[in-house]
Image: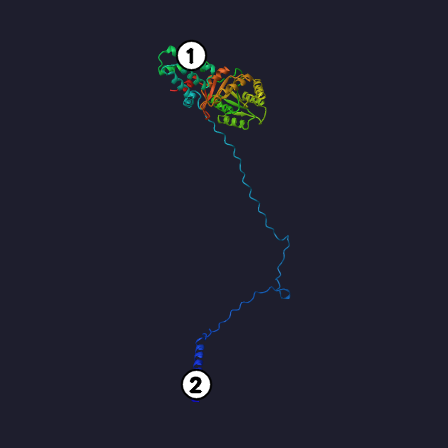
Amino acid sequence: MDILILAVVIALVAVGVISGLVVSSRKKKQLPPPAPPSTPTITAPPAEPQVGEDAVETAEEPRRTIEEVGLPEAEAPAPAPVVEPEAPAAPEIEVPEPTAGRLVRLRARLARSQNSLGKGLLTLLSREHLDEDTWEEIEETLLVADVGVVPTQELVDRLRERVKVLGTRTPADLRALLKEELLTLVGTDLDRVVKTESGEDTPGVIMVVGVNGTGKTTTTGKLARVLVADGRSVVLGAADTFRAAAADQLQTWGERVGARTVRGPEGGDPASIAYDAVKEGIAEGADVVLIDTAGRLHTKTGLMDELGKVKRVVEKHGPLDEILLVLDATTGQNGLTQARVFAEVVDITGIVLTKLDGTAKGGIVIAVQRELGVPVKLIGLGEGPDDLAPFVPEAFVDALIGD
């Protein structure tokens, strides 16, 4: 019994202890007292638009009629500034180089491409024994230089005879001998002056002819510079109406030296333009009229006939003073074929050899003169505006032989 009472007492004590622990734990976990209350901020909802009877009445304002309302006046646009078109600047008139001694100044340019002929001949002639093989080499050197078969044979025969008579052959003797014989072939007694004076009260008239690609229009422009440099006044006739921009090209050349160009529509009648050019030259009192014709293929009969027509029409004003044939020196012997056909259509009075500073062979001068029986009067030695020079045989042969 006592034991039972003791167990009950222990159980009661245990329950009391556990209850105290729980109450203590709860006291520790209580939240801190709340902060004193503050005045709450209340955000009012946005006001709703009032309609019907609740709408606020709009204050009455005086109304104006449309006549009373002044419209803003449109500002007048500022006048655009008047831009005066600039007149094209007049091209500056150039002063061409004097023609006297021009070939001498260009001699070095000529010698660069021609020296092989003179040096080759001098080397062969300086051999101790001039046997048949050596003379054949001399003949071959001349043929390669485009001298032509007949002139080559003449030169070789004369050299054989002169060397045999000469006996000793010093370099100075051989150079003098070769120069003399080449001058004989080139010809020192031919009239190489470009005719610019007519026997009548009309300008001298020069017609320039040639095949496409020989530099004919450019040569005509350079010839104008040559004539101006010699104190002549010039009128140009752009009768090449078949090649695009040929007239523009010629006019540009003329403007550089103050020469006027007479031209017509592209594809127009060349004879008519040539006639008008001479007519204008007479009216202006010009010294010379230069007529550039269309490049002709020597195989086209119709075109060659037209060239003859240009000549006949121009001659209604008076005789032509010069008909210059422009040949590309680099074409060699093929140029002789062209020259023959042109000579049959018009009476060629002189030859202009272009591109003689390039790969051309100097012997073509001799060959073409023999073929046509007319002199080379001008040669082109470069692309510069003053690289067209009157042909001087002595200066030419000096350039062939070299120093």
Task: Give me the disc on residue 192.
Answer: none
Q: Where does the C terminus fall, quadrant-wise? A: top left
Dot 2: what SS? helix
- Asked whether residue 163 appears in the rendered view, the answer is yes
**Mark 2 or mark 1: whose residue is earlier in sequence:** 2
Q: Where does the N terminus fall, quadrant-wise? A: bottom left
Q: Which residue is mark 2?
A: 7
Q: Which residue is mark 1?
A: 158
**Residue at the top extreme of this rendering:** 165
- Give the total number of marks visible in the rendering: 2
Label 1 sits on what residue type?
Arg
The one nearer the camera, 110 or 228, is 110
- Are the residues at dot 2 and dot 1 in contact (C-beta closer than 8 Å)? no
Assess disc 1: are there few (<14), some (14-19) or many (≥20) residues with their C-alpha within 10 Å of its C-alpha.
Answer: few
Where is residue 346, by image quadrant? top right
Is 55 drawn above or below residue 234 in the view shown? Answer: below
Percent across and percent down for residue 377 are: 47, 18
Percent across and percent down for residue 271 are: 58, 21
Query: Rounded to the nearest whole Å, what is the CA distance between mark 2 and mark 1?
Result: 170 Å
Please tell me whether mark 2 or mark 1 is closer to you in this view: 2
**Residue at the bottom extreme of this rendering:** 1
Percent across and percent down for residue 306 are: 58, 21
